[in-house]
Amino acid sequence: MKVKLVATALFMTATMCFGQEDLKEREKQAAFDPAYSSYSRKKPAYITLKDGTKIEGDIKDVDRKKGQIERLKIIENGKKKVKIEATEIADLYMAPSGFDQFNKQATYFNDATKWGKSDASKHISKGYTMYTNQMVSLKNKKKPTEYLMQVINPKYSQKIEVYADPWAKQTASIGVGSLKLAGGIAKSYYIKKGDEKVLWLTKKDFDEHFESLFMDNEKFKAKYADHKFKWSLLGVYVLDYTEFSMETETVESK
C-alpha cells in the first residue's frame, strides 16, 4: 500500500511539474514586447502613409500625448526635415533605444511570415517595434483620437492586437529585500479584437471582458471552461485564441 501511495504521489508530482514547465514555455512564447518610450537614432524608421506611400528616414523627434504618438519629425533622404501627423500614417516600424544590443527572438517565432504581412515579418525579425494607427479613447474617457500605438504582440496579432499603455501602473514585484524574484507587470493595456473599437483593458476589469474577448471560440472555451483566469496570462490567452481561431478557419476553408 505504501509503495502504491509513493508511486501515486511521484506520478502526481511529475504531472504537476510537467504542466508547470509547459505553461512556463507557453508564457515565453506569448511574452509581450516591452513598452518603449525611446527610439534609436542610429537606425532608420519605416513609415507607410494611409495613401500607400512608403517613407524611410531618421527620426529627429516624437511628440506624444499620454505616452501615445501624435506626430513624428524625420529627416527624409538625409536632407529634408519632415513633420508627419499620426492621422496621416498607417503604420510605423521604429528601432527601440539600445537596438545594437537587441537580442532577436529565435525560438517559437522563427517563421515570422506565418504571423502577418510581409512588412511586419521583415522588420520585426530585425528587432524593430511595430506601431499602427488606431482611433482610441484614452482610458475609455477621452474623445476618440488617432494615435500611433505600439503593438506588443506583433507576431500573433491577427485576431487580437494588444497595445502598450506607456502610463500603466505596475503590479508589485516579488522578492525579499534587495533580491527580486520577479518584476511587476503592467496593470493595463489597450486591446482590439477584430474590427471592434479599441478598449482600455485593466487588471481590475479583466473578468468583465474575458468572455467577450475569448469565449466565442469553441476550442478555447473547452480548454478554459473550468479555468480561473489570471491577468498575468493575458498573452497566453491571446496566443491560444489566435491559434484556435486560425485552426478553425483552416478547417472550414477545406
Image (cartoon, rainbow, N blue to C red):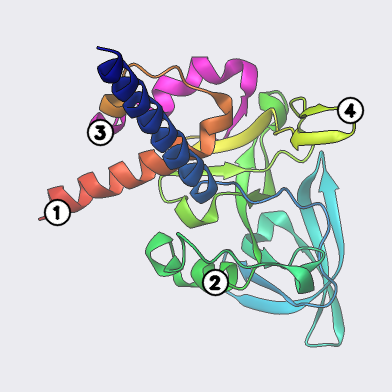
Whichever of callouts 4 and 1 sits on the residue coming sooner in the sequence is 4
- Corner quadrant of residue 65: top right
Q: CA distance from mark 4 to mark 1?
A: 56 Å
Q: Nearer the viewer, mark 4 or mark 1?
A: 4
Q: Nearer the viewer, mark 3 or mark 1?
A: 3
Q: Secondary structure at mark 4?
A: loop
Q: Residue at x 62, y 36 (%)?
A: 190
Q: CA distance from mark 4 to mark 2?
A: 53 Å
Q: CA distance from mark 4 to mark 3?
A: 43 Å
Q: Nearer the viewer, mark 2 or mark 1?
A: 1
Q: Residue at x 29, y 49 (%)?
A: 246
Whichever of callouts 4 and 3 sits on the residue coming sooner in the sequence is 4
Q: CA distance from mark 3 to mark 2?
A: 37 Å
Disc number placed over residue 126 in the picture, else none? none
Residue indicated by mark 3: 219
Magenta stretch containing residue 204, yes or no? yes
The amino acid pointed to by label 3 is Lys
Residue indicated by mark 2: 52
For the record, the magenta segment spans: 198-220
